Image (cartoon, coloured by chain):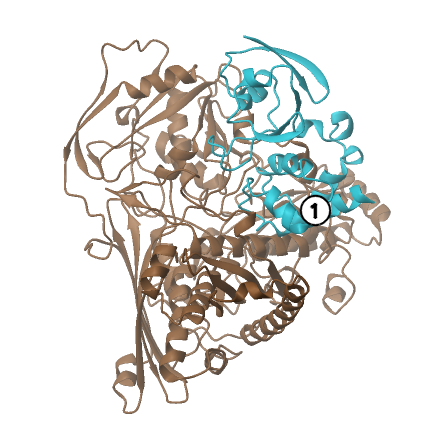
Chain colours: A brown, B cyan
Amino acid sequence: MSKKKRNGEKLRTVGHNVARAEGVEKVTGAARYIDDLSFDGMIYGATVRSTVPAGRIVAVEQDPAFDWSGFTFVDHRDIVAPGKNVVAMIADDQPFLAVDRVRHQAEPLALLAHADRARLAEGLAHVRVRYESETAQLDFESADKVLKEIAIRRGDVDEVFARQGVTVVEGTYRTGAQEQLYIECNGVIAMPGASNADDGGISVYGSMQCPYYVVRALCVLTGLPREKVRVVQTTTGGGFGGKEEYPSLIAGHAVLLARKSGRPVKMVYERHEDLVATTKRHPSIVRHRTALAKDGTILAIDVDLRLDGGAYVTLSPVVLSRAAIHATGPYRAEAVRIRGRVMMTNTPPNGAFRGFGAPQSQFAAEVHMDRIAGELGLDPIALRKKNLFRTGDVTATGQKLKDSVAAHEVLDRALARHALATKKNKKRAHNKNDAARGNGTPSGTGIALFFHGSGFTGGGEVKLASRAGLALAPDGVRLLVGSTEIGQGTRTMHAQIVAETLGIPYDCVETADPDTARVPDSGPTVASRTCMVVGKILQRAAEKLRAELGEYDDEKSFKKRARWLLAERGSVEIIEEYQKPGDIVWSDETYEGDAYGAYAWGCNIADVEIDPISYQARCTQFTTAIDIGKAIHPILAEGQIEGGTLQGIGWALYEDVVMRDGKMQNASLTNYIIPTTLDTPPISVEIVEHPYANGPFGAKGVGECPIDGPAAAIVNAIRAATGKRLDEVPATPERIMKAMA
Amino acid sequence: MKIKLHVNGKKKSVEVPPMKRLLDTLREDLGLTGTKEGCGEGECGACTVLVDGAAVNACLVPTCQVDDAELRTVEGIARGGGKEAARLHRLQRAFLDHGAAQCGICTPGMLMAALALPKKATLDEIRAGLAGNLCRCTGYMKIYDAVAQFLDGERA
């Protein structure tokens, strides 16, 4: 039956807006987030943090005059073999608790716990840390310590630049840090015992994207075997990458306090602490040199890309990898050279954030395209059309784009939609008789095109070897999957894929709790992989189950077959593992090959006006067309696109992380500004569906692609409005005023 | 200090320090954890509740200030306070229909702010009325759709 469906039989669940799996709990206040949970005997934990960006720790002292009764105190000496004081990630350079040196502000030095939160705050004020200050490297442009370097080479770039008659266009582009700003701060509760309090293990409940990352980190910290470490994701109030790697750190802290005190320990950050201590989007500086023929054909692209990694490696190497692979934007060239580096600075580590490096490198690529159009006297859209990837073109890593290439289609459909919306708005403005408002207000339109690889880069998915599956029940099936619901609709979308494949109603599919004692490791919930990669594994498990169930044609006969099979075997669980599509080839040594199985494609058009007095740029209308292969749940997919777009608009115009002495100075929602309703333009979304043969029902990734384009579209619109070039975001009034002066 | 409250139509009495944040009194003393804390400084609106019909940030209100007031929280929206879909308020249903709740952490506050909107609010008035409630997931479009559907029904 699934074969028939691919041949055009009507889908019954996929592509329909079924009821969100956990919707009712969320609109009634019944959903339990980490701070809503409480356990018998629970106490509260807090972190003693560094107040210098670099230094040698002389002493961490508890004030002898203070009454420490009822407190639990933990420092690095409480981490004992076989446990290790290392946050297990890519490099083993980051400690859970600093030992003798501090490498950034707000670095964890010691931990306190107490049953009374007021006493806990007093205790924090009575821990004194003495340092010998060291010189801090706070500027990544002049930094010389490289945490990771990547080189991508295709063809002979130098030969092309040396050719007679080529035009060379150069530009340098910068982007600032950005806070994920999930509305629920990072938080966990740790308690002694994996399955019962006395088994020597540990359990952690918390707000997170990747429970198995936390398991791995806790096994290293404690030296406990895998089966003694249990991690349960609680309802999570937003992630955006900010709960990818950071929860490993806070979970480790809570576990140290829980093991020492023997009690459940809750650690939930307040907003200020979350802002100063947790990861941000990597600031970037990108230099472009492009060689062009007179007609605007791109011949060679030469990019030098730098990211600010902060004090520890965390996930920076893979952020850099994605940034570098996407650095050409969706354009072909006969020769490409990309040099990417992550620099070490004495600032809190930067980390995962929706888009994962691609928004930074594609901001540069798309603002640079407008510079090229200006210098060559070409129409920016015609220039793009001439160079956009088509099926059969080859990317920077030498990947031949075989199917599902929609760069031209997203451009055409965004232009058509934008024209329609503009006509409608003009009419409305005319009717409201406020068209005169435009007088003296500079306004302009900007465009950006982009692409985004779905899933882990290169051989990443093979290494992950993700697993997911199904358990049969008398009335349906239960999904056994380690992917997390963080607002994007994982549970709903996975259930739809399985219901459709099994040919049963959506209501017959439920999802097991995301508890590592019960669900397999489906890989992290990141990288726009949860639908395309994990959804495909679930689809294969469902196909297998369907074959084992034999013939059935409706819900009733399905249940009959299910009961028969359960009676026959006692229990039926099918767990499948990731299978690499046969045609994907990648080399980590040469950085050549199929970087991603498939790409999502996008086009943004921003209309911007600039207040002539305050220089505040305001986006008045935003149009986005995104190709995601197949929208499993159109409303959820639109929600991802609208939300990602607005996060991109925030990065472009408002969100400015102000650092001084290595510390965020505007660590509050009063002065770190994210878009409110009043800052948000109408966002008009066009979903394009170019199916990908190896995705479930043709689906590719959706979560990240929408944030790759808005910043460039807006900066290009500001240029159109003012005639002045701005090569940096956020485009704050100060920067616009300077550009216009 | 003993403070009398009317919460979601029920009489309650709590013994709390007078300056305890209403947010903490609701969550800790009354067990109403549906009201969320996002920033603790009145910027994000996640803790929005209705006090005598007006939307306020419960993180900025000392409990003594609501003595004898009529409070409404997210737990008091659905008829009978039940969890079942059948008893959902029309605004809650509209949030579900339009995908206005993603991660859901801003949803309780957003619902309360929407309930305080004038019944004849235009789209511009909806935007202005919800400007104190931050959402990082949706881009707000689905929230406008949901609130507009709800208000349309109220007018009908």
Q: Mark 1 falls on what kind of element?
A: helix
Report the residue marked by disc 1: B146
Q: Can you see residue A218?
A: no
Task: Tell me the quarter of the picture where residue A620 sits.
Answer: bottom right
- Compared with A487, B112 (above or below) is above
Residue appearing at x 62%, y 55% in the figure: A637
Instruction: State left or right for residue A256 relative to residue A203.
Output: left
Looking at the picture, tell me which residue is in the foreground, A288 or A482.
Answer: A288
Task: Tell me the quarter of the picture where residue A632 sits.
Answer: bottom right
Q: Position of residue A173 (x, y in %)?
A: 33, 65
Q: Position of residue A188 (x, y in %)?
A: 47, 30
- Compared with A262, A626 (above or below) is below
Instruction: State left or right for residue A300 relative to residue A233.
Output: left
Residue appearing at x 64%, y 15% in the figure: B68
Which quadrant is home to the C terminus of chain A?
Answer: bottom left
Q: Position of residue A585 (x, y in %)?
A: 45, 68
Q: Can you see residue A263?
A: yes
Q: How many marks?
A: 1
Could you tell me the amino acid type at mark 1?
Ala
- Compared with A585, A25 (above or below) is above
Instruction: State the residue lying farthest toward the bottom.
Output: A164
Looking at the picture, tell me which residue is in the foreground, A292 or B14.
Answer: B14
Graded by Cα atoms within 10 Å as few (under 14), some (14 to 19) or many (20 or more), the crowding at tag 1 reads many
Q: Position of residue B127 (x, y in %)?
A: 61, 47
Residue appearing at x 76%, y 40% in the figure: A568
Which quadrant is home to the N terminus of chain A?
Answer: bottom right
Return the chain for callout 1. B
